Image: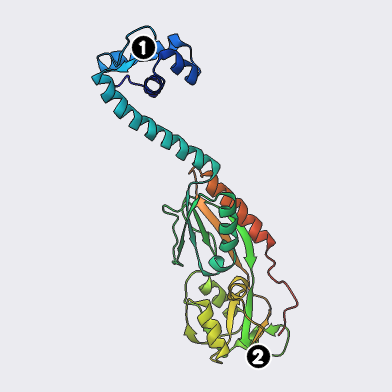
Amino acid sequence: MSNVELRHLAAMAAIAEEGSFGRAAARLGYTQSTVSQQIAALERAVGGPVFDRPGGPKAVRLTPLGSVVLDQGRALLAKAQALTDAVDRFKAGDGRIDIGTFQSVSNVILPSVVRRLRGEHPGCDIRLFEEEPEQPRIGDLDLLFYDGRIDGDVEHRKLLDDPYLLVAGAGTFPDGPVPLERLDGAPMVAWPLICDQPVMEQAIARGGARPQIVFRSAVNDTLLSMVRAGLGSAVLPWLAIHGAGIPPDGRLSIHELRPSLPPREIYLHWQAGRIQSPLAGRAVEIAVEVAAELAPPSAGIGA
């Protein structure tokens, strides 16, 4: 049975449906002798005739063995066609992609990436996983967004520099940039000490300021709510502020710091040496395009 080929089964199905070797050959684009050779090879493989050939104008008929072979053969042909279709969809970009992300990228960059991917490939299966571990790993993910480089055998593409800005209650500081030293002893709300947060707080300390951290939360909206409530100010990256969609309600002001802090760096990572699917490759291209369209501020932010 190991000698049975799909082309033999396709020829058999065509003969059974057309009723003759000649019409089956015309349908398949073969010569009649080629179809006869394929059926002969099939009969040798299964150990007996699969068609009765009455001759003349009478249609050929399946033998009992032929009925068994055709029944199972059609199932194999259907599976082979499903495999072909799946491979074609994969090559066209309609496969599955697993993407690791984190809060501000999920709010600002990924919606555009997902919208464009689904617009180009409506049949694609996009799975998103949001977490902010201290030591991120690619694992089984196709792509991973992270605010910094990650260890391991990975490749990466830097998407953008994400500057840190001061968010304060309206009137807490004068309009315009705020000297970093003004944060010394000031009450502040902040992220937990994960991802790039320790690096940012160390930069503030090197600038001569040691704020009083009165609350920590990993949720950007929660931190901004506490700033509105007057609990303290916050130093947040631009993506987090932009993603929160701060309304012009007069309760918050946004300032640059002088001197400015080193910006957070946003990278997109993938496993080195792993052949990327067309969908993952396109996702990288779109992410780069989306990041280039963003315009983090470099000067002139005031109240």
Q: Is residue 24 visible?
A: yes
- Residue at 52 percent of width and 40 percent of height: 91
**Is the C-beta separation of discs 1 and 2 under 8 Å?**
no
Rendered location of residue 158, percent (x, y):
61, 57
Rendered location of residue 82, percent (x, y):
42, 37
Q: In the picture shown, does residue 21 fall above or below 300? A: above
Three-letter amino acid code at the position of disc 1: Lys
Q: Is residue 1 visible?
A: no
Q: In the picture shown, does residue 175 fall above or below 39? A: below
- Who is closer to the viewer here, 155 or 117? 117
- Residue at 51 percent of width and 49 percent of height: 123
Upstream in the sequence, badge 1 or badge 2? 1
Where, quadrant-wise, is the N terminus in this rendering? top left
Q: Nearer the viewer, mark 1 or mark 2?
A: 1
The kind of secondary structure element at disc 1 is loop
Residue indicated by mark 1: 58
The kind of secondary structure element at disc 2 is loop
> Seen in the image, is 235 located left or right of residue 141?
right
Residue indicated by mark 2: 170
> Seen in the image, is 33 located left or right of residue 264?
left
**Gap between marks 1 and 2 measured at Cα:** 94 Å
Rendered location of residue 266, percent (x, y):
58, 63
Three-letter amino acid code at the position of disc 2: Ala
Q: In the picture shown, does residue 60 fall above or below 295? A: above
Q: Residue furthest top?
A: 56
